[in-house]
Image (cartoon, rainbow, N blue to C red):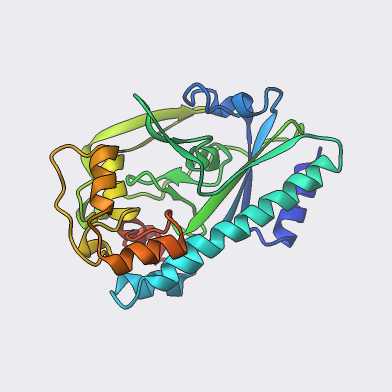
């Protein structure tokens, strides 16, 4: 199947970026989270992206308001990506193929020893599809938008020619993401290294539970929380859920109304120089 046909359809439906990775490029993913664990005869993964609104990011960055960022860059955007991926999957299935869209924001599991993990990593899929490279923060940086886009993936058995792996360099290792993280979740020295095709990518080790304390829970004022809950020496899900019960009552209601995946931080994304040039 011609990749141009899929891309033309996706762009017409609202995608800002689209890349295609062969399923083989993600064979090093954890067991149970490879494309062929989801669809045994998968041939490729189609990755779609829609950009964040710069105005919403800048309003949060200067400390004006977090709500447009939460809404337009996550809640509404996840909804738009879900619709987009369904339309592209239906486009493929109408032509006789199987297509499985992976939601943009869930499910995520707690799996020892893997930690917090999703069905499929959209970030790794995006890099495998040639859309960009990993920044030190672990966010995907694209030439078009830096870190300012959100991804969704479709696993399919359609035989579509993959795009080449991105060979440029965007991240300058300025470590701004390390500096601005309110809970010091991003290591400056420890790194993860992966190889896709002939290129090796590296990004920082992330303490996912510290990040979750800040970004998902909003448990510190520096991340737009209404009060700061002291970080325990070791953060596990038990201590995290206990901390959620200590939140300001208004913030509890806010999270219930807007959804548990509403982000409260995003500083690594907002302050990344690669996005500021967009």
Give the total of numbered labels. 0
Q: Can residue 203 be seen in this view?
A: yes
Between 222 and 269, the residue placed more toward the observer is 222
Q: Where is residue 181 in the image (x, y as percent from the top left)?
A: 24, 54
Which one is nearer the viewer's eye here, 9 or 168?
A: 9
Is 253 displayed left or right of 45 in the figure?
left
Residue at figure coordinates x 29%, y 58% from the top left: 218
Image quadrant in which you'd find residue 265: bottom left
The residue sitting at the bottom extreme is 64
| Percent coordinates x, y for residue 202 in the rendering | 36, 35
Question: In the displayed structure, would residue 115 be above or below residue 230?
Answer: above
Does 124 sit above or below residue 230? above
* Horizontal side, residue 143 vs residue 170: left or right: right
Quadrant in which the C terminus is drawn:
bottom left
Residue 179: % across, % down: 20, 54
> Going by the image, does 177 lie left or right of 27?
left
């Amino acid at each position: 199947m011609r990749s141009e046909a899929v891309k033309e359809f996706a762009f017409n439906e609202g995608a800002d970026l689209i890349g295609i990775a062969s399923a083989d490029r993600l064979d090093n993913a954890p067991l149970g989270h490879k494309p062929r664990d989801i669809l045994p005869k998968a041939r490729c993964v189609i990755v779609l992206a829609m950009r964040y609104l710069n105005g919403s990011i800048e309003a949060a960055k200067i400390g004006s308001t977090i709500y447009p960022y939460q809404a337009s860059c996550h809640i509404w955007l996840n909804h738009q990506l879900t619709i987009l991926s369904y339309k592209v999957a239906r486009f493929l299935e109408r032509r006789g193929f199987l297509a499985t869209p992976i939601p943009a924001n869930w499910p995520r599991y707690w799996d020892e020893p893997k930690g917090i993990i999703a069905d499929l990593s959209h970030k790794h899929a995006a890099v495998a599809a040639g859309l960009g490279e990993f920044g030190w923060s672990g966010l995907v940086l694209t030439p078009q938008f830096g870190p300012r886009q959100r991804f969704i993936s479709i696993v399919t058995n359609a035989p579509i020619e993959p795009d080449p792996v991105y060979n440029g360099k965007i991240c300058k290792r300025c470590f701004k993401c390390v500096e601005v993280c309110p809970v010091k979740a991003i290591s400056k020295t420890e790194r993860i290294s992966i190889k896709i095709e002939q290129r090796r990518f590296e990004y920082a080790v992330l303490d996912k539970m510290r990040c979750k304390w800040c970004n998902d829970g909003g448990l510190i004022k520096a991340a737009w929380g209404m009060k700061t809950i002291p970080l325990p020496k070791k953060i596990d899900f038990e201590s995290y859920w206990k901390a959620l019960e200590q939140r300001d009552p208004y913030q509890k209601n806010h999270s219930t109304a807007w959804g548990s995946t509403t982000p409260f931080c995003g500083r690594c994304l907002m302050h990344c120089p690669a996005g500021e040039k967009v």
